[in-house]
Image (tube, grey):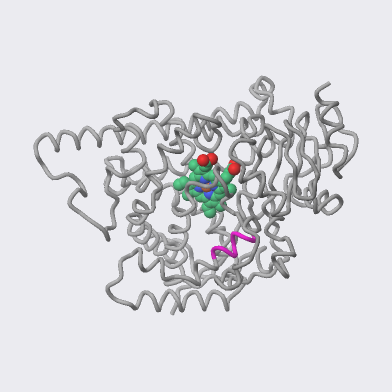
Amino acid sequence: VDKARRTSKLSHLPGPAYPLPIFGHVVHMLGPREGYMRRGMALWTLYGPGPVKFWLGEVPTVTLTRPEDVEPVLSSQSEVDKHDMLYSATLGFFGNGLLTLNGKAWLAHRRALTPAFHFRILDRYAGVFTRRAAAFAAQLGTEVPAGQSFNIMSKMGAFVIGSLMETAFGINPDLSDTPRSEQSEQLHQLVRAADETYDMIAYRILHPWLLAERLFKLSALGRRSRQHEATIAKFVQHVIEVKRAQLQHRAAAVARGEQVNGDDRDDDDDSVREKFTFLDMALSSKNNVMSDSEIIQEVRTLIAVQQTTASTISFIMVMLALHPEVQERARAEVREVNAIGGLSMLERLKRLKYVERVIKETLRLFPVTTFFARKLKKEMLLPDQKTLPAGVTVIVFMYLVHRDPRHWPLPEEFDPDRFLPERCSGRHPYSYAPFSAGPRNCIGQRYAMLQMTAVVAAILARLRVRPGEGCETRAALRVNADLFLKIEGGFNVRLEPVT
Ligand code: HEM
């Protein structure tokens, strides 16, 4: 009855007809995984650009691709929730943290995590990011033979999680008791498990009968998924153990009246003051905002979302390879800023305005979190008087919002200067939201921008990037989406030392 009621309430919207029991409309999406994006776009071309209805199994969804339609959904405080059915597929690996929580629990966690991402804290990360980025660029220069095509994404996962360990968790892998080789093996296992999991989550969403936990658990995919969950659980346990040992050590040092790591240091510092990291704050919190198991969930979430930064840096490298004139201009800026003496690491990163525009334009064309969903708690009226009924799941399709030709002339063209301040003024505020917007926006936005700027600057200073196999032209890029946007066949580039 409920379904019939909602079907009739969606009847005013364009979209495929006749949802089948259990399948809904997913039959339109089934086929080889490489074709997810192509098939989704074909549906939208047929029924868009306004709201398009689609039954994802038993779940009624409406996909939005215009900034004015997206605005009321993302800006709403009280009328939307994260959709439990779709987001539940992520819980086993991502944990039930900030990304998936709703209501009061979400608010309490958001308040607890916000101080760790405060701009004054992030400013301290500039030094860490710069040091790590320089080491990463040097490593790329030595490990990858000059001129050889390789998938740069294959190096990114371990790199960004390593940064997270040092910044948000206050664990410097260089200072750890665990041998380097063992640490690196742990990271690689985690990244492999993560990669397969993202793919699996997308597969479940498009095969919605696999969203039923009982059925999923019995499937081969379910068994594989449990192995990956165990891998992340082991990793997280290790992180918490190391942190607890550090905290005890610190407390003992304080009790002996000794100066402890970083307390005396102030601003431009290439290590993070331990007591300001998320994990230190959470585990030593006097008001006990989060229980131990909640902290574990947040650690899992923070680890799992690092893929966004890894993919974006990889997309940036491919775009720089395809646009040598943009690459040279960005490199000239990096050299100019590097030549100025007396600047703090943070000031250096902040001066890289063209690099910032390159990153923003890449995120416009390739917003790696290309879909996200909200469930409407109340009926919602869109600007063109179309109503969306309560209970429906709204899917924001950022890839197309960022290509709306009314706001982005020649949308496929890669032009970083679209983000010059004078060209931004007057643009619809929701025409660009790679980090989402409104109360559930990305808490890591500033963190990600700083880290990406540091990595791009370090690579440009040392290496020239050229297109690799299968990525020779824009038209050749096989862009696809599982949970995140990606290039089928790899983010292939060639590196050469800059002379
Ligand atoms: C280029 C990099 C990144 C992009 C494009 C990105 C994008 C997004 C988007 C679109 C959302 C909203 C998702 C939704 O509504 O379901 C989100 C949420 C979130 N992101 Fe990011 N993100 C990035 C990097 C990061 C980093 C580096 C961190 C942590 C260090 C992070 C932590 C989070 C968290 C915790 C949430 C949930 C926030 C909440 O609901 O309160 N993200 N991100």
100 lies left or right of 163: right
Based on the picture, tell me whether residue 473 belongs to the magenta stretch. no
Residue found 27% across the figure and 48% down from its top: 273
Residue 306, position in %: x, y? 49, 47
Position in image of residue 293 (x %, y %):
42, 26
Quadrant assignment, res 233: top left
Question: Quarter of the image containing the C terminus?
Answer: bottom left
Note whether residue 100 is visible.
yes
Relative to 331, say whether 85 is above or below.
above
Task: Specify whether residue 360 is painted magenta.
Answer: yes
Which residue is more in the foreground, 385 or 116?
A: 385
Reply above or below: 95 against 63: above
Task: Give coordinates of residue 496: x percent, y percent.
Answer: 49, 72
Residue under the image location 9 percent in, 39 percent down: 257
Q: Nearer the viewer, residue 284 or 233?
A: 284
* Magenta stretch prevailing secondary structure: helix
Q: Which residues are magenta?
A: 359-365
- Give the side of residue 405 with respect to residue 21, left or right: left
Name the residue located 36 percent from the left edge and 74 percent from the top edge.
338
In this view, the residue in front, 3 or 141, is 3
Image quarter for residue 320? Answer: bottom right
- Marks counted in the figure total 0
Q: Position of residue 267 (x, y in %)?
A: 26, 58
Rendered position, 416 above or below 384: below
Give the answer, above or below, for where 380 lies relative to 48. above
Report whether 426 appears left or right of 248.
right
Kindly identify the residue that appears in the image at 90 percent across and 34 percent down.
18
